Amino acid sequence: GRDCDGMAAMAPSGTPSDQGSARVLLVALAGHLAIVGVKLAAFAFTPYTAMLTEAIHSGVDTCDQLLLLVGQTRARRPPDETHPFGYGMETYFWSFIVALMIFGAGGAVSIWQGAHKLLSPQPIERPWISLVVLALCAVFEASSFTMAYREFRRFMRGRRRQISLWRFLAASKDPNLL
């Protein structure tokens, strides 16, 4: 087993607070929505079906964030007669659904895009639009990562034993982090 002494000092679940985790998921959701908007706008101004495919892919990422929020919300419900130990495991169920969506929908869109490009290739027009989209997406993703890293740093502040971000991710039991 892993030496998780540093993790023992965390919350009972071994993860940052639910509030901080939800905040990170909401920022990621906003970033993915912005990315969908940028890619759809680029598709409207160019003949690139790749931008439409990328917008669909980012839409799937947005749905993934929503499902993770659903799982996190449902996991906080108190125990009842049908679930005497509570609903905490729902987080893992919804994370599994997200993984299925990533591989299922992402794979289907990739196959569709590949077949479409092989059957009707298009010349590259206005490549600067693709570069602007790439730069904007990098900004949105960096903002999301920055928020997650700040939450990690806030969580680690005041702990007697500090651990690295990589070790934290490896030892965490929170599927929303991965």
Image: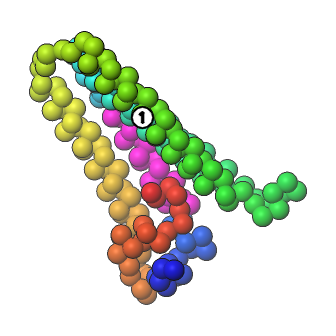
- What crowding class fits label 1: few (fewer than 14 Cα within 10 Å), some (14-19), or many (20 or more)? some
Residue 104 visible in the displayed image = yes
Side (left or right) of 44 relative to 128: right
Question: Is residue 149 placed above or below 2 in the rendered structure?
Answer: above
Residue 153 percent location from the top left of the image: 37, 70
Residue 68 percent location from the top left of the image: 54, 47
Q: In which quarter of the image is residue 49?
A: top left
Residue 40 visible in the displayed image = no
96 vs 60, nearest the viewer: 96
Q: Residue furthest right?
A: 81
Q: Quadrant of residue 53?
A: top left
Question: Is residue 77 placed above or below 117 in the rendered structure?
Answer: below
Dominant SS of magenta comes to helix
Question: Is residue 101 placed above or below 37 in the rendered structure?
Answer: below
Q: Residue furthest bottom?
A: 160
Judging by the rendered image, the residue that carries numbered circle 1 is: 106
Side (left or right) of 146 relative to 125: right
62 vs 160, nearest the viewer: 62
Determine the residue positioned at 38% across, 34% down.
Answer: 58
Question: Amino acid type of disc 1?
Answer: Gly
Determine the residue positioned at 47% across, 50% down.
Answer: 25
Q: In which quarter of the image is residue 111?
A: top left
Q: Is residue 31 magenta?
A: yes
147 vs 72, nearest the viewer: 72
98 vs 158, nearest the viewer: 98
Determine the residue positioned at 67% across, 58% down.
Answer: 89
Residue 94 percent location from the top left of the image: 60, 47
Determine the residue positioned at 36% across, 69% down.
Answer: 166
Residue bounds of the magenta highlight? 18-37
